[in-house]
Amino acid sequence: MKIGFVGLGAMGTPMARRLIEAGHQVTGCDLRPAALDALRAAGGTGVATAAEAARDVDLLWLMVVSGDQAEAVLFNGGDRGAAAALPPGALVVLGCTQPPAQAISTARRLQAMGLRMLDAPVSGGVAGATAGTLTIMISGSQADIAQARPAFEAVGRHCFDVGREAGMGSTVKMINQLLCGVHIAAAAEAMHLAEAHGVALDVVHRIIGVSAGNSWMWGDRGPRMMQGEPPVTSAVDIFVKDLGIVLGQGGLHKVALPLSSAAMNMFLATSGLGHGKCDDSQVIRAYRALNGDRGDRS
Amino acid sequence: MKIGFVGLGAMGTPMARRLIEAGHQVTGCDLRPAALDALRAAGGTGVATAAEAARDVDLLWLMVVSGDQAEAVLFNGGDRGAAAALPPGALVVLGCTQPPAQAISTARRLQAMGLRMLDAPVSGGVAGATAGTLTIMISGSQADIAQARPAFEAVGRHCFDVGREAGMGSTVKMINQLLCGVHIAAAAEAMHLAEAHGVALDVVHRIIGVSAGNSWMWGDRGPRMMQGEPPVTSAVDIFVKDLGIVLGQGGLHKVALPLSSAAMNMFLATSGLGHGKCDDSQVIRAYRALNGDRGDRS
Protein backbone atom coordinates (compact mmCIF):
# COMPACT_ATOMS: atom_id res chain seq x y z
CA MET A 1 0.00 0.00 0.00
CA LYS A 2 1.13 3.58 -0.56
CA ILE A 3 0.95 5.21 2.85
CA GLY A 4 1.47 8.83 3.85
CA PHE A 5 2.49 9.20 7.51
CA VAL A 6 2.31 12.50 9.39
CA GLY A 7 3.94 12.77 12.83
CA LEU A 8 7.18 10.85 13.26
CA GLY A 9 7.50 11.24 17.02
CA ALA A 10 8.19 8.66 19.73
CA MET A 11 5.20 6.62 18.54
CA GLY A 12 5.14 7.51 14.83
CA THR A 13 8.77 6.68 14.01
CA PRO A 14 8.67 3.03 15.10
CA MET A 15 5.19 2.62 13.58
CA ALA A 16 6.36 3.97 10.19
CA ARG A 17 9.39 1.68 10.40
CA ARG A 18 7.18 -1.36 10.94
CA LEU A 19 4.96 -0.37 7.99
CA ILE A 20 8.05 -0.21 5.77
CA GLU A 21 9.24 -3.60 7.06
CA ALA A 22 5.81 -5.04 6.20
CA GLY A 23 6.38 -3.98 2.58
CA HIS A 24 4.38 -0.76 2.45
CA GLN A 25 5.66 2.29 0.63
CA VAL A 26 5.80 5.05 3.25
CA THR A 27 6.17 8.79 2.66
CA GLY A 28 6.51 10.56 5.98
CA CYS A 29 6.58 14.10 7.24
CA ASP A 30 7.57 15.73 10.52
CA LEU A 31 8.76 19.17 11.62
CA ARG A 32 12.03 17.74 12.95
CA PRO A 33 14.65 17.02 10.25
CA ALA A 34 16.18 14.25 12.42
CA ALA A 35 12.89 12.34 12.25
CA LEU A 36 12.94 12.55 8.45
CA ASP A 37 16.52 11.25 8.40
CA ALA A 38 15.50 8.30 10.57
CA LEU A 39 12.62 7.52 8.21
CA ARG A 40 14.90 7.65 5.17
CA ALA A 41 17.42 5.39 6.91
CA ALA A 42 14.60 2.88 7.44
CA GLY A 43 13.76 2.91 3.73
CA GLY A 44 10.97 5.49 3.59
CA THR A 45 10.65 8.82 1.83
CA GLY A 46 10.89 11.96 3.95
CA VAL A 47 9.08 15.08 2.78
CA ALA A 48 8.76 18.59 4.23
CA THR A 49 4.98 19.07 4.28
CA ALA A 50 1.89 17.03 5.06
CA ALA A 51 0.47 17.91 1.65
CA GLU A 52 3.45 16.25 -0.01
CA ALA A 53 2.99 13.20 2.20
CA ALA A 54 -0.65 13.02 1.12
CA ARG A 55 -0.03 13.07 -2.63
CA ASP A 56 -0.95 9.87 -4.49
CA VAL A 57 -1.34 7.71 -1.36
CA ASP A 58 -4.01 5.09 -0.65
CA LEU A 59 -3.98 5.89 3.03
CA LEU A 60 -2.87 8.90 5.09
CA TRP A 61 -2.06 8.03 8.73
CA LEU A 62 -1.92 10.85 11.28
CA MET A 63 0.04 10.17 14.49
CA VAL A 64 0.13 13.77 15.70
CA VAL A 65 -0.28 14.80 19.35
CA SER A 66 -3.87 16.06 19.37
CA GLY A 67 -7.10 16.45 17.46
CA ASP A 68 -6.28 20.14 16.99
CA GLN A 69 -2.98 19.25 15.34
CA ALA A 70 -4.78 16.71 13.15
CA GLU A 71 -7.27 19.38 12.02
CA ALA A 72 -4.43 21.82 11.31
CA VAL A 73 -2.55 19.22 9.25
CA LEU A 74 -5.64 18.29 7.25
CA PHE A 75 -7.39 21.61 6.72
CA ASN A 76 -5.10 24.58 7.41
CA GLY A 77 -4.13 26.43 4.27
CA GLY A 78 -7.33 25.25 2.59
CA ASP A 79 -6.31 24.00 -0.85
CA ARG A 80 -2.74 23.61 0.37
CA GLY A 81 -3.72 21.36 3.33
CA ALA A 82 -3.19 17.61 3.37
CA ALA A 83 -6.88 16.79 2.84
CA ALA A 84 -6.99 18.81 -0.39
CA ALA A 85 -3.82 17.06 -1.58
CA LEU A 86 -5.23 13.55 -1.15
CA PRO A 87 -6.48 11.64 -4.19
CA PRO A 88 -10.29 11.40 -4.41
CA GLY A 89 -11.73 8.74 -2.10
CA ALA A 90 -8.49 8.26 -0.15
CA LEU A 91 -8.64 6.93 3.40
CA VAL A 92 -7.47 8.98 6.40
CA VAL A 93 -6.54 7.12 9.60
CA LEU A 94 -6.68 9.29 12.73
CA GLY A 95 -4.38 7.74 15.33
CA CYS A 96 -4.26 10.56 17.86
CA THR A 97 -6.07 10.75 21.20
CA GLN A 98 -8.82 13.34 20.86
CA PRO A 99 -12.33 14.10 22.14
CA PRO A 100 -14.93 11.85 20.49
CA ALA A 101 -16.79 14.94 19.22
CA GLN A 102 -13.67 16.13 17.41
CA ALA A 103 -13.24 12.76 15.68
CA ILE A 104 -16.85 13.03 14.50
CA SER A 105 -16.46 16.58 13.20
CA THR A 106 -13.22 15.77 11.33
CA ALA A 107 -14.88 12.71 9.77
CA ARG A 108 -17.75 14.91 8.52
CA ARG A 109 -15.42 17.51 7.01
CA LEU A 110 -13.44 14.79 5.21
CA GLN A 111 -16.61 13.13 3.98
CA ALA A 112 -17.80 16.45 2.54
CA MET A 113 -14.57 16.50 0.52
CA GLY A 114 -15.19 12.98 -0.84
CA LEU A 115 -12.70 11.38 1.53
CA ARG A 116 -13.08 8.54 4.06
CA MET A 117 -11.85 8.35 7.65
CA LEU A 118 -11.19 5.78 10.37
CA ASP A 119 -11.14 6.84 14.02
CA ALA A 120 -8.27 4.63 15.22
CA PRO A 121 -6.44 5.65 18.42
CA VAL A 122 -3.80 3.31 19.79
CA SER A 123 -2.54 2.11 23.17
CA GLY A 124 0.69 0.44 24.21
CA GLY A 125 3.18 3.30 24.26
CA VAL A 126 6.58 3.47 22.67
CA ALA A 127 7.36 -0.11 23.71
CA GLY A 128 4.24 -1.38 21.93
CA ALA A 129 4.92 0.75 18.84
CA THR A 130 8.47 -0.58 18.60
CA ALA A 131 7.47 -4.22 19.09
CA GLY A 132 4.40 -3.96 16.84
CA THR A 133 2.17 -4.98 19.72
CA LEU A 134 -0.10 -1.92 19.91
CA THR A 135 -3.78 -2.19 20.68
CA ILE A 136 -5.83 -0.25 18.11
CA MET A 137 -9.46 0.80 18.72
CA ILE A 138 -10.97 1.30 15.29
CA SER A 139 -14.36 2.69 14.29
CA GLY A 140 -15.64 3.40 10.80
CA SER A 141 -17.14 1.53 7.84
CA GLN A 142 -16.40 -2.18 7.59
CA ALA A 143 -15.05 -1.77 4.05
CA ASP A 144 -12.62 0.95 5.17
CA ILE A 145 -11.45 -1.15 8.13
CA ALA A 146 -10.90 -4.11 5.81
CA GLN A 147 -8.85 -1.95 3.45
CA ALA A 148 -6.63 -0.62 6.23
CA ARG A 149 -6.28 -3.92 8.11
CA PRO A 150 -2.90 -4.94 6.62
CA ALA A 151 -1.47 -1.62 7.79
CA PHE A 152 -3.04 -1.95 11.25
CA GLU A 153 -1.71 -5.47 11.61
CA ALA A 154 1.81 -4.32 10.81
CA VAL A 155 1.85 -2.21 14.00
CA GLY A 156 -0.80 -3.77 16.24
CA ARG A 157 -1.27 -7.11 17.93
CA HIS A 158 -4.91 -6.39 18.85
CA CYS A 159 -6.92 -4.46 16.25
CA PHE A 160 -10.47 -4.05 17.59
CA ASP A 161 -13.42 -3.04 15.42
CA VAL A 162 -15.46 -1.04 17.97
CA GLY A 163 -18.26 0.21 15.74
CA ARG A 164 -19.46 1.91 12.60
CA GLU A 165 -19.36 5.57 13.69
CA ALA A 166 -16.43 7.95 14.03
CA GLY A 167 -16.02 8.86 17.70
CA MET A 168 -16.52 5.32 19.00
CA GLY A 169 -12.81 4.50 18.74
CA SER A 170 -12.01 7.74 20.55
CA THR A 171 -14.57 6.98 23.27
CA VAL A 172 -12.94 3.64 24.09
CA LYS A 173 -9.51 5.25 24.00
CA MET A 174 -10.72 7.99 26.37
CA ILE A 175 -11.88 5.33 28.84
CA ASN A 176 -8.48 3.69 28.57
CA GLN A 177 -6.79 7.05 29.21
CA LEU A 178 -8.90 7.61 32.31
CA LEU A 179 -7.45 4.39 33.70
CA CYS A 180 -3.92 5.16 32.50
CA GLY A 181 -3.89 8.62 34.10
CA VAL A 182 -5.36 7.44 37.40
CA HIS A 183 -3.00 4.44 37.49
CA ILE A 184 0.12 6.58 36.92
CA ALA A 185 -0.91 9.02 39.65
CA ALA A 186 -1.83 6.12 41.96
CA ALA A 187 1.58 4.54 41.34
CA ALA A 188 3.21 7.84 42.29
CA GLU A 189 1.04 8.10 45.42
CA ALA A 190 2.01 4.56 46.46
CA MET A 191 5.72 5.09 45.72
CA HIS A 192 5.62 8.33 47.67
CA LEU A 193 4.00 6.66 50.68
CA ALA A 194 6.71 3.97 50.48
CA GLU A 195 9.38 6.72 50.42
CA ALA A 196 7.81 8.31 53.49
CA HIS A 197 8.15 4.97 55.30
CA GLY A 198 11.73 4.43 54.23
CA VAL A 199 10.83 1.21 52.42
CA ALA A 200 13.21 0.26 49.59
CA LEU A 201 11.33 1.26 46.44
CA ASP A 202 12.78 -1.44 44.19
CA VAL A 203 11.62 -4.12 46.64
CA VAL A 204 8.12 -2.65 46.84
CA HIS A 205 8.04 -2.43 43.06
CA ARG A 206 8.92 -6.10 42.68
CA ILE A 207 6.42 -7.29 45.31
CA ILE A 208 3.49 -5.29 43.99
CA GLY A 209 4.34 -6.46 40.46
CA VAL A 210 3.18 -9.93 41.55
CA SER A 211 0.34 -8.75 43.80
CA ALA A 212 -3.24 -7.60 43.34
CA GLY A 213 -2.09 -3.95 43.30
CA ASN A 214 -0.32 -4.45 39.99
CA SER A 215 -1.15 -2.48 36.85
CA TRP A 216 0.36 -2.10 33.39
CA MET A 217 1.42 1.41 34.43
CA TRP A 218 3.02 0.19 37.67
CA GLY A 219 5.21 -2.11 35.58
CA ASP A 220 6.00 0.48 32.92
CA ARG A 221 6.22 3.80 34.81
CA GLY A 222 7.24 2.46 38.25
CA PRO A 223 10.94 1.98 37.40
CA ARG A 224 11.11 5.50 35.93
CA MET A 225 9.61 6.94 39.14
CA MET A 226 12.73 5.70 40.94
CA GLN A 227 14.97 7.68 38.56
CA GLY A 228 15.84 11.34 39.02
CA GLU A 229 15.75 12.33 35.35
CA PRO A 230 14.29 9.42 33.38
CA PRO A 231 14.08 9.49 29.58
CA VAL A 232 10.79 10.98 28.33
CA THR A 233 8.61 8.39 26.66
CA SER A 234 5.40 10.33 27.25
CA ALA A 235 5.32 13.78 28.82
CA VAL A 236 3.36 15.02 31.84
CA ASP A 237 1.57 17.51 29.56
CA ILE A 238 0.23 14.65 27.42
CA PHE A 239 -1.73 13.49 30.45
CA VAL A 240 -2.84 17.02 31.22
CA LYS A 241 -4.34 16.88 27.72
CA ASP A 242 -5.73 13.32 27.93
CA LEU A 243 -7.32 13.70 31.38
CA GLY A 244 -8.58 17.06 30.09
CA ILE A 245 -10.41 15.11 27.36
CA VAL A 246 -11.84 12.71 29.98
CA LEU A 247 -13.04 15.51 32.29
CA GLY A 248 -14.30 17.58 29.35
CA GLN A 249 -16.38 14.63 28.21
CA GLY A 250 -17.60 14.14 31.79
CA GLY A 251 -18.61 17.80 31.74
CA LEU A 252 -20.48 17.35 28.45
CA HIS A 253 -22.44 14.37 29.79
CA LYS A 254 -22.68 15.73 33.39
CA VAL A 255 -20.77 12.79 34.87
CA ALA A 256 -18.70 13.47 38.01
CA LEU A 257 -15.37 11.62 37.90
CA PRO A 258 -13.72 12.04 41.33
CA LEU A 259 -10.60 9.91 40.78
CA SER A 260 -9.90 11.36 37.35
CA SER A 261 -10.22 14.85 38.87
CA ALA A 262 -7.80 14.02 41.68
CA ALA A 263 -5.30 12.55 39.20
CA MET A 264 -5.67 15.56 36.90
CA ASN A 265 -4.80 17.87 39.79
CA MET A 266 -1.53 16.01 40.38
CA PHE A 267 -0.55 16.19 36.68
CA LEU A 268 -1.55 19.87 36.55
CA ALA A 269 0.50 20.62 39.65
CA THR A 270 3.52 18.79 38.18
CA SER A 271 3.22 20.86 35.04
CA GLY A 272 2.73 24.04 37.08
CA LEU A 273 5.94 23.25 38.98
CA GLY A 274 7.71 23.44 35.63
CA HIS A 275 7.96 19.71 34.83
CA GLY A 276 5.38 19.52 32.02
CA LYS A 277 7.90 18.30 29.45
CA CYS A 278 9.32 15.61 31.80
CA ASP A 279 8.37 11.96 31.65
CA ASP A 280 4.86 11.46 33.06
CA SER A 281 6.31 9.19 35.78
CA GLN A 282 7.52 12.44 37.33
CA VAL A 283 4.02 13.22 38.57
CA ILE A 284 5.63 11.89 41.76
CA ARG A 285 7.27 15.33 42.02
CA ALA A 286 3.89 16.88 42.78
CA TYR A 287 3.61 14.51 45.76
CA ARG A 288 7.07 15.51 46.97
CA ALA A 289 6.17 19.18 46.59
CA LEU A 290 2.87 18.67 48.42
CA ASN A 291 4.14 16.59 51.34
CA GLY A 292 7.83 17.41 51.45
CA ASP A 293 10.54 15.25 49.95
CA ARG A 294 10.81 12.30 52.36
CA GLY A 295 12.93 10.46 49.85
CA ASP A 296 14.65 7.38 51.01
CA ARG A 297 15.32 6.63 47.34
CA SER A 298 17.11 3.37 48.08
CA MET B 1 4.18 -29.30 60.99
CA LYS B 2 1.35 -29.03 63.50
CA ILE B 3 -0.55 -25.89 62.51
CA GLY B 4 -3.42 -24.13 64.23
CA PHE B 5 -5.49 -22.04 61.84
CA VAL B 6 -7.93 -19.35 63.00
CA GLY B 7 -10.34 -17.78 60.49
CA LEU B 8 -11.72 -20.17 57.86
CA GLY B 9 -13.31 -17.55 55.62
CA ALA B 10 -13.07 -17.03 51.85
CA MET B 11 -9.26 -16.85 52.12
CA GLY B 12 -8.65 -19.08 55.13
CA THR B 13 -10.57 -22.14 53.95
CA PRO B 14 -8.62 -22.71 50.71
CA MET B 15 -5.35 -21.85 52.51
CA ALA B 16 -6.01 -24.43 55.25
CA ARG B 17 -6.91 -26.98 52.58
CA ARG B 18 -3.61 -26.42 50.77
CA LEU B 19 -1.69 -26.78 54.05
CA ILE B 20 -3.39 -30.15 54.62
CA GLU B 21 -2.59 -31.22 51.05
CA ALA B 22 1.05 -30.32 51.66
CA GLY B 23 1.11 -32.81 54.54
CA HIS B 24 0.67 -30.50 57.52
CA GLN B 25 -1.57 -31.41 60.44
CA VAL B 26 -4.15 -28.60 60.63
CA THR B 27 -6.49 -27.82 63.51
CA GLY B 28 -8.83 -25.01 62.52
CA CYS B 29 -11.40 -22.82 64.17
CA ASP B 30 -14.11 -20.48 62.91
CA LEU B 31 -17.40 -19.12 64.24
CA ARG B 32 -19.36 -20.68 61.37
CA PRO B 33 -20.04 -24.44 61.77
CA ALA B 34 -20.14 -24.87 57.96
CA ALA B 35 -16.52 -23.73 57.76
CA LEU B 36 -15.52 -26.37 60.32
CA ASP B 37 -17.37 -29.05 58.35
CA ALA B 38 -15.47 -28.02 55.19
CA LEU B 39 -12.17 -28.26 57.06
CA ARG B 40 -13.02 -31.71 58.39
CA ALA B 41 -14.02 -32.86 54.90
CA ALA B 42 -10.59 -31.73 53.67
CA GLY B 43 -8.86 -33.84 56.34
CA GLY B 44 -8.33 -31.27 59.10
CA THR B 45 -9.58 -31.09 62.68
CA GLY B 46 -12.30 -28.55 63.44
CA VAL B 47 -12.50 -27.09 66.94
CA ALA B 48 -14.81 -24.56 68.57
CA THR B 49 -12.34 -22.07 70.06
CA ALA B 50 -9.06 -20.43 69.09
CA ALA B 51 -7.51 -21.66 72.35
CA GLU B 52 -8.21 -25.26 71.31
CA ALA B 53 -6.69 -24.57 67.88
CA ALA B 54 -3.56 -23.21 69.61
CA ARG B 55 -2.92 -26.20 71.86
CA ASP B 56 0.25 -28.19 71.09
CA VAL B 57 0.91 -26.56 67.70
CA ASP B 58 4.25 -25.44 66.23
CA LEU B 59 2.61 -22.55 64.43
CA LEU B 60 -0.64 -20.63 64.85
CA TRP B 61 -1.81 -18.90 61.67
CA LEU B 62 -4.40 -16.11 61.96
CA MET B 63 -6.42 -15.28 58.82
CA VAL B 64 -9.01 -13.10 60.53
CA VAL B 65 -10.43 -9.90 59.05
CA SER B 66 -8.56 -7.25 61.04
CA GLY B 67 -5.83 -6.53 63.55
CA ASP B 68 -8.54 -5.95 66.17
CA GLN B 69 -9.91 -9.44 65.58
CA ALA B 70 -6.39 -10.86 65.78
CA GLU B 71 -5.84 -9.15 69.14
CA ALA B 72 -9.18 -10.42 70.41
CA VAL B 73 -8.38 -13.99 69.33
CA LEU B 74 -4.94 -13.91 70.92
CA PHE B 75 -5.49 -11.98 74.12
CA ASN B 76 -9.20 -11.74 75.05
CA GLY B 77 -10.06 -13.83 78.03
CA GLY B 78 -6.50 -13.55 79.31
CA ASP B 79 -5.47 -17.06 80.31
CA ARG B 80 -8.24 -18.49 78.15
CA GLY B 81 -7.04 -16.66 74.99
CA ALA B 82 -5.16 -18.38 72.17
CA ALA B 83 -1.79 -16.84 73.10
CA ALA B 84 -1.96 -18.29 76.59
CA ALA B 85 -2.87 -21.70 75.16
CA LEU B 86 0.17 -21.87 72.87
CA PRO B 87 3.16 -23.99 73.87
CA PRO B 88 6.19 -21.94 75.03
CA GLY B 89 8.16 -20.45 72.13
CA ALA B 90 5.47 -21.20 69.53
CA LEU B 91 5.31 -19.14 66.35
CA VAL B 92 2.31 -16.93 65.51
CA VAL B 93 1.77 -15.94 61.85
CA LEU B 94 -0.39 -12.82 61.43
CA GLY B 95 -1.93 -12.94 57.96
CA CYS B 96 -4.48 -10.16 58.27
CA THR B 97 -4.27 -6.65 56.84
CA GLN B 98 -3.71 -4.27 59.74
CA PRO B 99 -1.98 -0.96 60.54
CA PRO B 100 1.81 -1.42 60.82
CA ALA B 101 1.69 -0.04 64.38
CA GLN B 102 -0.79 -2.74 65.41
CA ALA B 103 1.46 -5.49 64.01
CA ILE B 104 4.31 -4.05 66.08
CA SER B 105 2.28 -3.87 69.29
CA THR B 106 0.94 -7.43 68.90
CA ALA B 107 4.49 -8.69 68.29
CA ARG B 108 5.64 -7.03 71.52
CA ARG B 109 2.80 -8.50 73.57
CA LEU B 110 3.54 -11.99 72.22
CA GLN B 111 7.25 -11.58 72.82
CA ALA B 112 6.56 -10.63 76.45
CA MET B 113 4.75 -13.98 76.76
CA GLY B 114 7.75 -15.89 75.38
CA LEU B 115 6.14 -16.32 71.93
CA ARG B 116 7.39 -15.38 68.46
CA MET B 117 5.51 -13.65 65.61
CA LEU B 118 5.77 -13.10 61.88
CA ASP B 119 3.98 -10.15 60.26
CA ALA B 120 2.84 -11.85 57.06
CA PRO B 121 -0.08 -10.32 55.16
CA VAL B 122 -1.03 -11.82 51.80
CA SER B 123 -2.25 -10.63 48.40
CA GLY B 124 -3.95 -12.48 45.56
CA GLY B 125 -7.52 -12.86 46.74
CA VAL B 126 -9.64 -15.97 46.84
CA ALA B 127 -8.37 -17.04 43.43
CA GLY B 128 -4.76 -16.91 44.64
CA ALA B 129 -5.61 -18.69 47.90
CA THR B 130 -7.35 -21.50 46.01
CA ALA B 131 -4.57 -21.91 43.45
CA GLY B 132 -1.78 -21.58 46.04
CA THR B 133 -0.39 -18.57 44.16
CA LEU B 134 -0.63 -15.94 46.90
CA THR B 135 2.01 -13.28 47.37
CA ILE B 136 3.13 -13.13 51.03
CA MET B 137 4.98 -10.13 52.50
CA ILE B 138 6.83 -11.45 55.51
CA SER B 139 8.79 -9.60 58.19
CA GLY B 140 10.37 -11.02 61.33
CA SER B 141 13.48 -12.91 62.37
CA GLN B 142 15.25 -14.94 59.71
CA ALA B 143 15.08 -18.08 61.83
CA ASP B 144 11.31 -17.73 62.27
CA ILE B 145 10.83 -17.14 58.54
CA ALA B 146 12.92 -20.23 57.77
CA GLN B 147 10.83 -22.30 60.17
CA ALA B 148 7.54 -21.17 58.61
CA ARG B 149 8.71 -21.28 54.99
CA PRO B 150 7.29 -24.76 54.17
CA ALA B 151 3.88 -23.54 55.32
CA PHE B 152 4.17 -20.28 53.36
CA GLU B 153 5.21 -22.14 50.23
CA ALA B 154 2.17 -24.39 50.46
CA VAL B 155 -0.10 -21.38 49.88
CA GLY B 156 2.11 -18.79 48.18
CA ARG B 157 3.98 -18.58 44.91
CA HIS B 158 5.94 -15.48 45.96
CA CYS B 159 7.05 -15.37 49.61
CA PHE B 160 9.01 -12.15 50.14
CA ASP B 161 11.21 -11.53 53.16
CA VAL B 162 10.75 -7.75 53.55
CA GLY B 163 12.73 -7.17 56.75
CA ARG B 164 13.53 -8.03 60.32
CA GLU B 165 10.90 -5.93 62.14
CA ALA B 166 7.21 -6.55 62.70
CA GLY B 167 5.27 -3.83 60.84
CA MET B 168 7.37 -3.97 57.68
CA GLY B 169 5.22 -6.69 56.11
CA SER B 170 2.12 -4.67 56.99
CA THR B 171 3.63 -1.51 55.50
CA VAL B 172 4.20 -3.16 52.12
CA LYS B 173 0.73 -4.69 52.25
CA MET B 174 -0.74 -1.24 53.03
CA ILE B 175 0.95 0.18 49.94
CA ASN B 176 -0.48 -2.68 47.91
CA GLN B 177 -3.95 -2.00 49.34
CA LEU B 178 -3.67 1.68 48.41
CA LEU B 179 -3.23 0.57 44.80
CA CYS B 180 -5.93 -2.11 45.02
CA GLY B 181 -8.51 0.30 46.41
CA VAL B 182 -7.74 3.06 43.93
CA HIS B 183 -7.71 0.57 41.04
CA ILE B 184 -11.11 -0.91 41.95
CA ALA B 185 -12.68 2.56 42.22
CA ALA B 186 -10.95 3.64 38.98
CA ALA B 187 -12.31 0.55 37.22
CA ALA B 188 -15.80 1.48 38.44
CA GLU B 189 -15.33 5.09 37.28
CA ALA B 190 -14.22 3.90 33.83
CA MET B 191 -17.03 1.33 33.54
CA HIS B 192 -19.53 3.98 34.60
CA LEU B 193 -18.26 6.45 31.98
CA ALA B 194 -18.57 3.66 29.40
CA GLU B 195 -22.16 3.04 30.54
CA ALA B 196 -22.92 6.76 30.19
CA HIS B 197 -21.72 6.55 26.57
CA GLY B 198 -23.70 3.43 25.78
CA VAL B 199 -20.54 1.50 24.95
CA ALA B 200 -20.84 -2.29 25.36
CA LEU B 201 -19.08 -2.99 28.65
CA ASP B 202 -17.82 -6.46 27.75
CA VAL B 203 -16.11 -5.05 24.65
CA VAL B 204 -14.48 -2.24 26.64
CA HIS B 205 -13.39 -4.77 29.24
CA ARG B 206 -11.71 -6.95 26.62
CA ILE B 207 -9.97 -4.03 24.86
CA ILE B 208 -8.60 -2.45 28.03
CA GLY B 209 -7.44 -5.86 29.20
CA VAL B 210 -4.83 -5.72 26.41
CA SER B 211 -4.15 -1.97 26.68
CA ALA B 212 -2.07 0.28 28.90
CA GLY B 213 -5.10 0.95 31.11
CA ASN B 214 -5.09 -2.63 32.36
CA SER B 215 -4.69 -3.60 36.01
CA TRP B 216 -4.96 -6.79 38.05
CA MET B 217 -8.18 -5.39 39.51
CA TRP B 218 -9.62 -4.54 36.08
CA GLY B 219 -9.19 -8.18 35.12
CA ASP B 220 -10.52 -9.56 38.41
CA ARG B 221 -13.27 -7.12 39.45
CA GLY B 222 -14.28 -5.82 36.00
CA PRO B 223 -16.43 -8.84 35.07
CA ARG B 224 -18.23 -8.64 38.44
CA MET B 225 -18.99 -4.94 37.85
CA MET B 226 -21.08 -6.04 34.87
CA GLN B 227 -23.19 -8.31 37.09
CA GLY B 228 -26.20 -7.14 39.09
CA GLU B 229 -25.58 -9.30 42.18
CA PRO B 230 -22.16 -10.89 41.85
CA PRO B 231 -20.87 -13.40 44.41
CA VAL B 232 -18.98 -11.72 47.25
CA THR B 233 -15.29 -12.56 47.16
CA SER B 234 -14.28 -9.47 49.15
CA ALA B 235 -16.79 -7.01 50.59
CA VAL B 236 -17.03 -3.24 50.14
CA ASP B 237 -16.51 -2.84 53.90
CA ILE B 238 -13.14 -4.61 53.67
CA PHE B 239 -11.93 -1.73 51.51
CA VAL B 240 -13.48 0.81 53.84
CA LYS B 241 -11.21 -0.80 56.45
CA ASP B 242 -8.11 -1.15 54.23
CA LEU B 243 -8.23 2.37 52.79
CA GLY B 244 -8.94 3.50 56.35
CA ILE B 245 -5.58 1.95 57.32
CA VAL B 246 -3.89 3.74 54.39
CA LEU B 247 -5.40 7.13 55.24
CA GLY B 248 -4.81 6.64 58.98
CA GLN B 249 -1.16 5.97 58.28
CA GLY B 250 -1.06 9.03 56.00
CA GLY B 251 -2.50 10.99 58.92
CA LEU B 252 0.15 9.64 61.30
CA HIS B 253 2.97 10.63 58.94
CA LYS B 254 1.24 13.81 57.66
CA VAL B 255 1.14 12.58 54.06
CA ALA B 256 -1.75 13.81 51.88
CA LEU B 257 -3.06 11.02 49.62
CA PRO B 258 -5.58 12.59 47.23
CA LEU B 259 -6.42 9.52 45.11
CA SER B 260 -6.77 7.24 48.12
CA SER B 261 -9.10 9.81 49.69
CA ALA B 262 -11.24 10.01 46.55
CA ALA B 263 -11.42 6.21 46.34
CA MET B 264 -12.27 5.94 50.05
CA ASN B 265 -15.18 8.33 49.55
CA MET B 266 -16.64 6.06 46.87
CA PHE B 267 -16.34 2.94 49.07
CA LEU B 268 -17.78 4.85 52.03
CA ALA B 269 -20.69 6.07 49.93
CA THR B 270 -21.35 2.54 48.66
CA SER B 271 -21.41 1.28 52.23
CA GLY B 272 -23.60 4.21 53.29
CA LEU B 273 -26.07 3.31 50.54
CA GLY B 274 -26.47 -0.05 52.29
CA HIS B 275 -24.16 -2.16 50.10
CA GLY B 276 -21.27 -2.65 52.55
CA LYS B 277 -21.62 -6.44 52.57
CA CYS B 278 -21.75 -6.65 48.74
CA ASP B 279 -18.79 -7.56 46.56
CA ASP B 280 -16.35 -4.64 46.38
CA SER B 281 -16.88 -4.46 42.60
CA GLN B 282 -20.22 -2.89 43.53
CA VAL B 283 -18.49 0.40 44.35
CA ILE B 284 -19.87 1.16 40.87
CA ARG B 285 -23.24 1.65 42.62
CA ALA B 286 -21.90 4.82 44.27
CA TYR B 287 -21.18 6.19 40.78
CA ARG B 288 -24.70 5.32 39.65
CA ALA B 289 -26.13 6.98 42.75
CA LEU B 290 -23.98 10.07 42.23
CA ASN B 291 -24.54 10.57 38.50
CA GLY B 292 -27.79 8.73 37.88
CA ASP B 293 -28.04 5.23 36.47
CA ARG B 294 -27.18 5.67 32.78
CA GLY B 295 -26.87 1.93 32.42
CA ASP B 296 -26.63 0.53 28.99
CA ARG B 297 -25.52 -2.74 30.63
CA SER B 298 -25.14 -4.53 27.32
Image: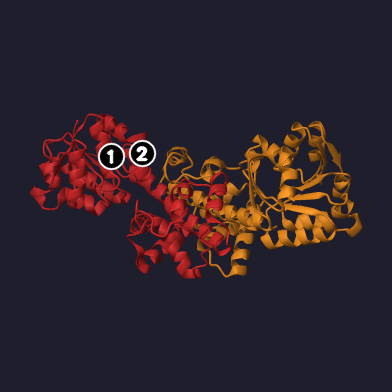
Chain colours: A orange, B red
| Callout 1: SS | helix
Q: In the rendered view, would you say A184 is above or below A133? A: below
- Measured in 3D between alpha carbons, the distance from the residue under mark 1 to the one under mark 2, in whole angstroms, is 9 Å
Q: Which residue is mark 1?
A: B15
The image quadrant where one finds the N terminus of chain A is top right
Q: Neighbour class for label 2 at 10 Å: few (<14), some, many (≥20)?
A: many
Disc number for residue A266: none
Q: Which residue is mark 2?
A: B134
Where does the image place residue B44, in percent across and percent down from the top left?
A: 18, 37
Say left or right for B34 vs A34: left
- Amino acid type of the residue tagged 1 in the rendering: Met
**Residue positioned most to the right:** A79
Where does the image place residue A281, in percent across and percent down from the top left?
A: 57, 47
- Amino acid type of the residue tagged 2 in the rendering: Leu
The answer to whether the residue labelled 1 contacts the one labelled 2, judged by CB atoms less than 8 Å apart, is yes
**Residue positioned most to the front:** A143
Where does the image place residue A207, in percent across and percent down from the top left?
A: 42, 39
| Residue located 59% across and 68% down the image | A253
